[in-house]
Image (cartoon, grey):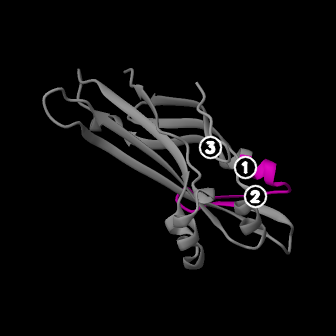
């Protein structure tokens, strides 16, 4: 299933797999940056992306309960010296370099084997909904750009939440 955004992020595929005691997320997003964001990237602005993942227990008589909240922050940057794009994922200790922006955006949109929670966090016989999105975190931009990001929708880069009922 796809969701479309102009100059934004599209969810292309999502798969949640149970591996013994943990659940791992594999997801693919298509990232399309506006010319303003591309220009900022080429001028040395590091772009902070965040993958958000939640598991929600839906309850009919009271508010839904968020059981799991996981975020994966990583950054996309451009080095004028090497003319390469870098993705830095400090949380998982992964760094990668790319020759083109297209290659870097493809890689930035691929999430593989991300352990998002332990199976023991879920109660048996309870139905849960999972949701995931990828977004540019405006709060992680340099302070000089944060105000511009708040005032301009050109900096709003996010996929909508992709939701599904979990099967166990």
Left or right side of 62 for 154: right
- Mark 3 or mark 2: whose residue is earlier in sequence: 3
User: In this rendering, which labeled residue sits more in front, label 2 or label 1?
Assistant: 2
The C terminus appears in which quarter of the rendering?
top left
Tell me which corner region of the image, top left, top right, bottom left or bottom right, holds residue 148: bottom right
Left or right side of 162 for 107: right
Residue at 58% x, 24% y is 1
Residue at 54% x, 71% y is 146
Residue 97 higher or lower than 54, as above or below: below
Residue 73 percent across, percent down from the top left? 53, 58
Residue under numbered circle 3? 9
Residue under numbered circle 2? 35
- Mark 2 or mark 1: whose residue is earlier in sequence: 2
Crowding around mark 3 (Cα neighbors within 10 Å: few <14, some 14 to 19, many 20+) is many
Secondary structure of the residue carrying tag 3 is: strand
Residue 57 higher or lower than 158, as above or below: above
Tell me which corner region of the image, top left, top right, bottom left or bottom right, holds residue 31: top right
Given the current orientation, which residue lies at the most extreme front position?
151
Residue 94 percent across, percent down from the top left? 63, 57
Residue under numbered circle 1? 105
> What residue span does the magenta drawing correspond to?
87-105
């Amino acid at each position: 299933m796809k969701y479309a955004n102009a100059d934004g992020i599209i969810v292309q595929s999502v798969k949640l797999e149970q591996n013994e005691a943990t659940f791992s997320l594999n997801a693919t997003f298509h990232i399309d940056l506006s010319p303003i964001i591309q220009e900022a990237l080429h001028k040395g602005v590091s772009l902070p992306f965040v993958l958000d993942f939640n598991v929600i227990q839906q309850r009919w008589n009271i508010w839904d309960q968020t059981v799991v909240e996981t975020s994966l922050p990583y950054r996309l940057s451009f080095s004028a010296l090497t003319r390469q794009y870098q993705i830095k994922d400090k949380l998982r200790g992964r760094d990668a370099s790319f020759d083109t922006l297209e290659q870097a955006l493809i890689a930035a949109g691929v999430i593989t084997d991300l352990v998002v929670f332990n199976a023991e966090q879920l109660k048996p016989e309870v139905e849960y909904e999972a949701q995931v999105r990828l977004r540019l975190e405006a709060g992680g931009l340099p302070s000089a750009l944060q105000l511009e990001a708040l005032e301009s929708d050109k900096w709003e880069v996010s996929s909508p939440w992709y939701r599904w009922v979990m099967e166990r």
